[in-house]
Amino acid sequence: MRKTFVSDQNDTPEVDPEDIRAAEKAAGIETVPEGTEDLPPETPPEDPTEAELIVELQAQLVEAKAERLRAVAEAENTRKRAEREVSNVRKYAAEPLARDFLQVAEFIRMALQSVSEEQADADPLLKNLRVGVAMTEKTLLDAFERNHVTRIVAKQGDGYDHNLHEAISRIDAPEGVEAGQIVQMVGAGYRLHDRLIKPATVVVAQAAEAATKAATEAVDAAEVGGEGDNNA
């Protein structure tokens, strides 16, 4: 049942505001909310002009081209990286085998150095043995060369290079050799293509003062150790 409101002054029933709004809506009358009568009507957004559309489309085209270039560059980098990895696998595939034979090559070299040419000339059997060992070494080194394994040889007076050499000892510089130069090669080094697989082990010359200081420190350390033992 619809409610009506009766005024105190007369018996005329008051109309419910909801009934008024419902009637206006049914009649197609737009009701202006209270307090908004003086506000200007809302302006619908304007459609972009042709020039604005062109600018927007051009920006989208530039971005799409940039995205495409980035994707192409990334794909190319991935392809090159994969090719490089495959190439390295093939290039250094012989490294494990080469490392296994390096010690064999060093043993052969030590066997040759243990017998001088003068000793070999004095004994025909020893000479034939030495010739056979030398031929074996040459055959092995030729096999290394065919597989891109090169021997690194250091001579007295050569400069020390930490990329190729490993100093196992330092001694007072002998006559004709400067500090920092190689005095003697103990063991040859080997390289597979451009990769060092074994540095040449060498003895390096140092200044006389450095050698004296090192010897003094060693003596002092020994004396300190001896005193400690005596006190104990």
Image (cartoon, grey):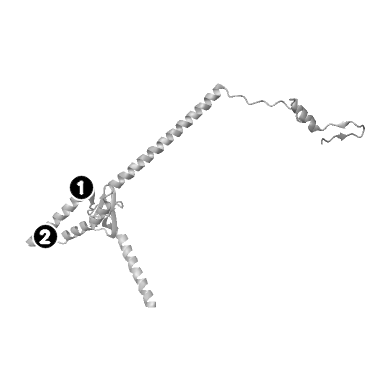
Give coordinates of residue 232: x percent, y percent.
Answer: 39, 77
Based on the displayed image, in which of its 4 quarters is residue 17 positioned? top right
Residue in front for this viewpoint, 46 or 23: 23
Looking at the image, is mark 2 or mark 1 nearer the viewer?
A: 1
Q: Is residue 215 above or below residue 94?
A: below
Give coordinates of residue 157: x percent, y percent.
Answer: 24, 53
Quadrant holding the N terminus: top right
- Residue 24 lies left or right of residue 185; in this view the side is right
Task: Indicate the secondary structure of the residue bearing disc 1.
Answer: helix
- Residue 36 lies left or right of residue 229; in this view the side is right
Outermost residue toward the front?
1
Alpha-carbon distance for marks 2 and 1?
26 Å
Residue at left 33%, top 67%?
218
Q: Earlier in the sequence, mark 2 or mark 1?
A: 2
> Number of marks in the image?
2
Q: Which residue is mark 1?
A: 146
Count residues near mark 2 (Cα–Cα under 10 Å), then give few for <14, some for 14-19, many for 20+.
some
Q: Which residue is mark 2?
A: 129
Outermost residue toward the top?
50
Based on the displayed image, in which of its 4 quarters is residue 178 positioned? bottom left
Q: Identify the mark at residue 6; answer none if there is no mark.
A: none
Residue at left 42%, top 36%?
71
Residue at left 19%, top 50%?
143
Q: Is residue 108 above or below residue 39?
A: below
Evaluate whether residue 112 shows in this view: yes
Q: Is residue 54 above or below residue 99?
A: above
Task: Indicate the secondary structure of the residue bearing disc 2.
Answer: helix
Based on the displayed image, in which of its 4 quarters is residue 22 positioned? top right
